[in-house]
């Protein structure tokens, strides 16, 4: 969802990424490079936290709280600089509705939009007039085209636009976190392999199957904060203690391994079941044409020790953690520690947007 009727001169002007998470804000701006293993040069980045009461079911209900936090970040906590007011913003994928669908080829644009809307009405449990609806053609065929339709409540999007206006930002692009993750992964040296991408946020694990485009999506309540609360309740410890246990031991070999595994097993089984369901759907639609070859984990929750090994055993696929900083030339900057780098995945994907992707 980008701006329209915008002069061509904006096509080469910079855009920065803004990721509004459950408890934190992250910003990043890069300059695209041509050639070489590094795709972009870092201009500036930063993060800060805000009171969770500012959000309610994905809607920013206290924009002044987040606006104050964002302005404070710009003034006091940036590493480097943000040189533009033009911004790309993400909407949490778990607050969106997505659906893979097949429609006849060679439809006019207006007929295609009408057909997508008609299909969407059958599975989205809220009135379409309350949603912004968009779609992406993921495969073209003589008999049927595959599409991925995404709908987001207008109330959520409009609250983000209000926040931007309060701090004097011009919104160029609004997209889901999974769309930003897919852009990030498209820079990976192994992006030609059909992959399951899992973005572990605070509240959810957003899952997608990627092959040149996002083909299938799903969401499970299996984020980092969910893991912490499972450990807290099962081991009868405080939230702070549970966070330390998760970060220090996780699912790796330790004296606490059995206790932690038992605490997390119900949530992990839901995650595995959803991934397997999506893999089956993919196999039914693409067969051996695009076999899934790897699982890639993103986000702050992916740094839990032993998680990649646990999923490798369960899914019988290689699982690896994806470092969003591997594409950045950040020479001269104080970079975050290895664990904290992972939480910049979504905002890094946003910052990699090419203005020409928006103004076509």
Image (cartoon, grey):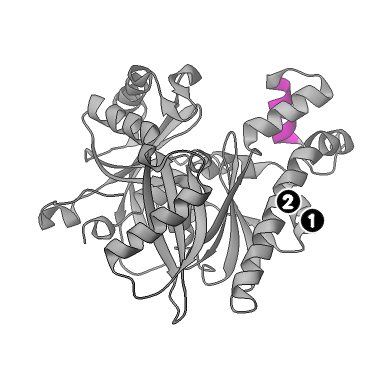
- Say above or below: 255 vs 48: below
Q: Residues within 10 Å of mark 2 (few under 14, many from 20)?
A: some
Quickly name the residue at label 1: 314
- Seen as rendered, the residue at the extreme bottom is 142
Is residue 242 on the magenta stretch?
A: yes
Which numbered mark, 1 or 2, is in the foreground of this view?
Answer: 2
Choose the circle earlier in sequence order: 1 or 2: 2
- Say above or below: 302 vs 208: above
Marking on residue 218: none
Q: Indicate the secondary structure of the residue bearing disc 1.
A: helix
What span is colored magenta in the figure? 240-248
* Residue ID at (69%, 20%): 239
Q: Main secondary structure of the magenta part?
A: helix
Quadrant of res 81: top left
Quadrant location of the C terminus in the rendered image: bottom left
Residue 332: x and y, percent? 37, 45
Q: Mark 1 and 2 residues: CB-CB less than 8 Å, in contact?
A: yes
Quickly name the residue at label 2: 272
Separation of disc 1 and disc 2 at Cα? 7 Å
How many numbered circles does the render carry? 2
Choose between 354 and 61: the one closer to the eye.
61
């Amino acid at each position: 969802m980008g701006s329209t009727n915008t002069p061509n001169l904006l096509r080469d002007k910079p855009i920065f990424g803004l990721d509004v998470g459950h408890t934190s804000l992250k910003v990043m701006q890069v300059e695209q490079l041509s050639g070489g293993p590094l795709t972009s040069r870092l201009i500036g980045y930063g993060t800060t936290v805000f009171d969770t009461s500012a959000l309610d079911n994905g809607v920013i209900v206290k924009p002044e709280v987040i606006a104050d936090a964002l302005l404070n970040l710009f003034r006091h906590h940036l590493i480097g600089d943000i040189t533009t007011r033009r911004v790309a913003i993400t909407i949490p994928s778990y607050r969106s509705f997505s659906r893979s669908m097949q429609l006849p080829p060679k439809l006019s644009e207006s007929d295609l939009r009408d057909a997508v809307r008609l299909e969407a009405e059958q599975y989205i449990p809220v009135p379409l007039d309350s949603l912004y609806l968009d779609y992406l053609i993921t495969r073209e065929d003589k008999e049927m085209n595959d599409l991925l339709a995404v709908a987001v409540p207008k109330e959520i999007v409009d609250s983000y636009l209000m926040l931007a206006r309060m701090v004097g930002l011009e919104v160029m692009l609004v997209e889901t976190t999974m769309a930003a993750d897919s852009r990030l992964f498209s820079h990976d040296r192994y992006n030609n392999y059909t992959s399951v991408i899992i973005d572990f946020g605070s509240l959810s694990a957003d899952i997608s199957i990627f092959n040149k485009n996002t083909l299938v999506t799903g969401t499970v309540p299996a984020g980092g904060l969910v893991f912490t609360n499972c450990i807290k309740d099962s081991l009868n410890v405080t939230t702070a203690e549970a966070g330390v246990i998760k970060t220090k031991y996780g699912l790796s070999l330790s004296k606490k391994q059995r206790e932690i595994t038992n605490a997390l097993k119900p949530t992990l089984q839901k995650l595995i079941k959803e991934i397997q369901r999506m893999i089956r759907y993919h196999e039914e639609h693409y067969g051996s044409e695009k076999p899934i070859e790897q699982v890639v984990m993103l986000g702050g929750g992916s740094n839990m020790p032993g998680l990649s090994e646990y999923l490798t055993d369960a899914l019988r696929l290689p699982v690896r953690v994806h470092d969003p900083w591997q594409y950045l030339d950040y020479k001269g900057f104080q970079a975050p520690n290895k664990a904290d780098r992972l939480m910049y995945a979504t905002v890094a994907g946003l910052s990699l947007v090419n203005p020409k992707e928006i103004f076509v």
